[in-house]
Image (cartoon, rainbow, N blue to C red):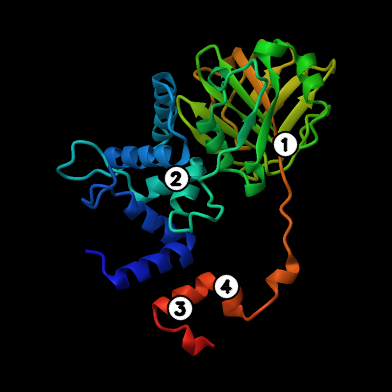
Amino acid sequence: MLTYEDLVISKAVYEKGTRDEIEEFIYELCDVNGDGFLERCDLEAVLDSISDAVFTPKNSQAALSSSKVVMKAFLSATEFSHEVEGKAENCMSLADFRNWCNVIPSARKYLGSLLKLPDTVRPGFQIPHLLHPENLSLESLTLQKEHAWHILGALSQTGAQQWKLVYHSAINGLSFSTFMGSISSVEGPTILVMKDSEGHIYGGYASQPWERHNDFYGDMKSFLFQLYPQASIFRPTGQNNNLQWCAVNFSSDSIPNGIGFGGRANHFGFFLSSSFDQGHSFTCTTFNSPCLSKTNQIRPDVIECWAVLTKEINHDKTELVRGSVLERFKEDRNMLKLVGLANSSE
């Protein structure tokens, strides 16, 4: 049974502990069947719970099936390295779980905000509103809302507003010049999503606008991601600054025309040539990412580009400085009340 003291201590660790303490708490929380081991069936139950809580009920069997496929991709990113006597399959160690949290940050955010009040903005519960032309149904898009939730896990809350489709190869054609024209007015971040001829879906988050350069540019907010058949986020490692690439109308072989992320010229983490009919993906130290597809050489089937429409959050600084410390931090005050220390702190 859960005693009152257990609840207070658990809540204190969950909300006030160090990152390692919180992740260990969540790791134990995910042991759904309560046998002391985190098995595949436990994580499947957790992902089903996330799907039911975050995403609206599906109104068709096809949509429900599509959601299950996407959620299965999150499970594919896990490792089960812990051998347990008497278990037919390996279990997930705490180190495995922490690695999974790094590549699926949206799940970590969700599991880390379960005890927050429902009427507050809870990380891991938001999905960007996907704006697209009326002649394109949501089901016909490569980027589904489950994918958007996954990518959003690596962004700040300001990225949770609206994402607008500014280029789609089925509408605009597989044309580099059309692509550059379509995104020329976008001043903020963009998300490049590609489905290749092998059926793999992946891409990159570009924190800076796509502009003509003869070398790498960008900042450490950019990252690569996989969406299917495995879902993962690959953030910059800091080993180099080879983040974004956008070369247009250069005649030198050392400056390949096209757009890309990470690695080095002619050996990118992800690259689409200016012909827009081929590209490549190699293991790269920029993002510590593997080849994103089945093979290094890739052929696009569908290319999408989404503009991230951020909205600045205005804070009323005068409200933040009013009252005592305990009045300004009601959550901390309530915690002290639970253990009988609130009055002695006044």
Q: Please name the residue shown 61% across and 15% down the image.
A: 302
The tag earlier along the polypeptide, 4 or 3, is 4
Q: Which residue lies under the disc numbered 4?
A: 329
Q: Secondary structure at mark 1?
A: loop
- Mark 1, Cα crowd under 10 Å, few <14 / some 14-19 / many 20+, is many
Q: Disc 2 vs disc 4: which is toward the camera?
A: 4
Q: Please name the residue shown 48% across and 58% down the image.
A: 116
Q: Which residue lies under the disc numbered 2?
A: 99
261 left or right, relative to 256 = left
Q: Disc 1 vs disc 3: which is toward the camera?
A: 3
Q: Disc 1 vs disc 2: which is toward the camera?
A: 1
Cα gap from disc 2 to disc 3, whole angstroms: 34 Å
The tag earlier along the polypeptide, 1 or 2, is 2
79 shown above or below 29: above
- Mark 3, Cα crowd under 10 Å, few <14 / some 14-19 / many 20+, is some
User: What is the x, y in percent for residue 103?
Assistant: 49, 40
Cα gap from disc 1 to disc 4, whole angstroms: 34 Å
